[in-house]
Image (cartoon, helix red, strand yellow):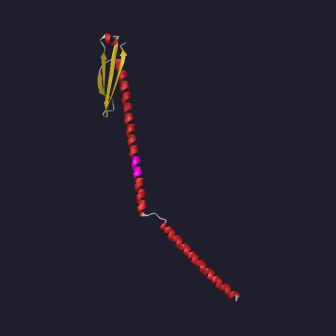
Amino acid sequence: MKAIDYKKRRTKDEGRRTKKKTTRLSSLISHLSSSGFTLLEIMIALAIAGIAIIAILQTVNYHAGVAYEHTLYTRMLLMAKEKIGETEIYLQDDKGVFPETDISYETMVREFKDSQQTGDEGIVELKVIIRGHDKEIELSELVTRK
């Protein structure tokens, strides 16, 4: 009798185990299927990422433009200083275009004749105007005639 009871218990235990396995498996499958993202959540995430990327690209583009403007301004300022130095040597008016650029220049020399105005008869005003890329830079300098 003990052998029969043992067999009955064993089949009962096996039945319980298979029920537990199937319920665990079905709960795992239902958990996995409900743990995904919905289409709406994915679309919202993509919209947020797109807005962030557009903002970053606009910021980079703006700062690249500002850097270009500063580079151009510095380049034109150096050209103006170069022309002031040449005008100081030759002391004559001149107009022209810098080679291999579309930047033009104009130099002017003005001598002060009135000694009461300056207190010295050898003072000369040098003026350089640089034009290009819709910008204009004007430098002037007072020098004494040698």
Is residue 56 within the magenta segment? yes
In the depicted structure, whether residue 5 falls above or below residue 38: below
- At a point 37% along the width and 34% down the height, the residue shown is 72
Q: Residue at x 60, y 77 (%)?
A: 17
Image position, residue 87 (x, y; %): 34, 20
Query: Residue 86: image x %, image y %?
Result: 36, 21
- Residue farthest to the right, as pictured: 2
Quadrant that contains the C terminus: top left
Relative to 44, does residue 18 appear above or below in the rendering? Answer: below
Q: Which residues are magenta?
A: 51-57
| Residue 21 at x, y percent in the picture | 57, 75
Please identify the quadrant where the N terminus is shown. Answer: bottom right
At 37% from the left and 32% from the top, the residue drawn is 73
Dominant SS in magenta: helix
Q: Nearer the viewer, residue 70 or 85?
A: 70
Is 91 covered by the magenta stretch? no
Is residue 46 positioned above or below 102 on the image?
below
